[in-house]
Image (cartoon, rainbow, N blue to C red):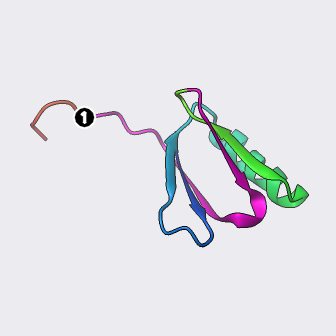
């Protein structure tokens, strides 16, 4: 699933692919914001993104899109 994370005072958003489900990511955001801790998300390559919950501007969750191969449409 593709996740876009907006951070306050940062002009670019973070975009990553994660194997976590929609519900897992949503619950992680809710918990981090409620507790005032950090939002942690692991991407498909094994890396982690850690953002302080009070700096989150938005988290956009989307479906994984298959990669297109070739020059045709």
Element type at mark 1: loop
Tell which residue pokes out farthest to the front in this image: 10
In percent of the image, x 51 and y 43: which residue is there?
A: 16
Q: Viewed as shown, does residue 56 lie left or right of 10? A: right
In the image, farthest residue toward the right: 35
Q: Nearer the viewer, residue 52 or 28?
A: 52
> In this rendering, is residue 67 above or below 26?
above
Question: For the point 47% across and 63% down, which residue is it?
Answer: 12
Q: Residue at x 84, y 54 (%)?
A: 37
| Residue in the image at 50% along x and 59% along y | 13
Q: x, y percentage for residue 21?
A: 63, 36
On-image quarter of the C terminus: top left
Query: Residue 26: x and y, percent?
Result: 70, 49
Q: Where residue 20 sits in the image (x, y, percent)?
A: 63, 34
- Count of residue discs: 1
The segment highlighted magenta reads 46-67
Report the residue that reaches farthest toward the left.
72
The verdict on residue 51 being magenta is yes
Residue 18 in picture, x, y percent from top left = 56, 35
Would residue 26 be counted in the magenta stretch? no
24, above or below 57, in the image: above
Mark 1: give few (<14), some (14-19) or many (20+) Cα within 10 Å: few
The residue lying toward the viewer, choosing from 49 and 73, is 49
Residue 70 lies in what quarter of the image?
top left
Please indicate whether residue 12 sits to the left or right of residue 33 in the image.
left
In which quadrant of the rendered view does residue 22 lie? Answer: top right
Residue 5 located left or right of residue 28: left
Task: Examine the image and state in which quarter residue 35 appears.
Answer: bottom right
- Provide the residue designation for mark 1: 68
């Amino acid at each position: 699933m593709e996740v876009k994370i907006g951070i306050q005072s940062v002009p670019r958003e973070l975009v990553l692919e994660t194997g976590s489900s929609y519900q897992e990511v949503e619950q992680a955001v809710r918990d981090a914001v409620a507790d005032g801790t950090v939002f942690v998300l692991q991407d498909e390559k094994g890396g982690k993104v850690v953002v302080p919950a009070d700096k989150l501007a938005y988290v956009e969750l989307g479906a994984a899109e298959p990669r297109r191969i070739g020059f045709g449409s």
